[in-house]
Image: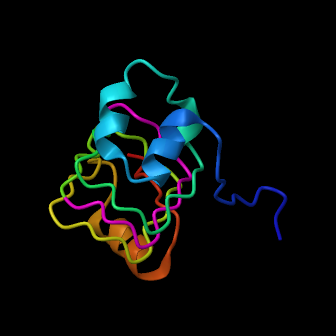
Amino acid sequence: MSDKEIKPVIKADPLYQMLRREDVDDFNANRDSLDTSELTGGDYRGRDLRRMNARGLDFSNAYFRNCDLSGIDFRETNLEGASLMDAKVSGVYFPEALSADEIQLSLDHGTRLRYHQD
């Protein structure tokens, strides 16, 4: 195993815990007034996160296995290194730098998302 291995973490951060409890409305109401830096590398496995306002957030290295992400707009969200294995992504907007193939690999095999470098 690499010493750079990235594993998802369960955190005590208030915003992170709102998402773990699937309290998306409370998250959306508080996201602009609380520190969002602890959302990176989080374990969101199996959560229903529909309706989440993800604009401008950093979900790099996050673990979204089996999450319902339907309808979320991630166009202005950092998803570098995130994993989407078996997530529901109907109606999701992804960042332009992510190819459809890259997204499909992550959905099917759990690979970490890699952004295109032009």
Residue at the location (35% across, 67% down)?
103
| Residue farthest along the bottom direction in this orientation | 108
In percent of width and height, residue 50 lies at: 25, 55
Residue at the location (36% across, 40% down)?
77
Q: Quick check: is 44 in the magenta stretch?
A: no
Residue at the location (66% across, 54% down)?
9
In percent of width and height, residue 71 lies at: 18, 56
Q: Nearer the viewer, residue 40 or 22?
A: 22
Residue at the location (39% across, 77% down)?
86
Q: Is residue 92 above or below residue 54?
A: below
Q: Nearer the viewer, residue 45 or 59?
A: 45
Q: Quadrant of the N terminus?
A: bottom right
Give the magenta range.
55-70
Q: Is residue 91 left or right of residue 15?
A: left
In percent of width and height, residue 94 lies at: 27, 52
Secondary structure mostly taken by the magenta-highlighted segment of the chain: loop
What sort of colour scheme is used for the picture? Answer: rainbow
In percent of width and height, residue 10 lies at: 64, 53
| Residue farthest along the top direction in this orientation | 33
Q: Is residue 9 left or right of residue 60?
A: right
Instruction: Examine the rendering and report whether any part of residue 12 can be seen.
Output: yes
Q: Count up the numbered dots.
A: 0
Q: Is residue 84 above or below residue 75?
A: below
Instruction: Examine the rendering and report whether any part of residue 59 can be seen.
Output: no
Q: Is residue 25 left or right of residue 20?
A: left
Q: Nearer the viewer, residue 30 or 71?
A: 30
Q: Quick check: is 56 in the magenta stretch?
A: yes
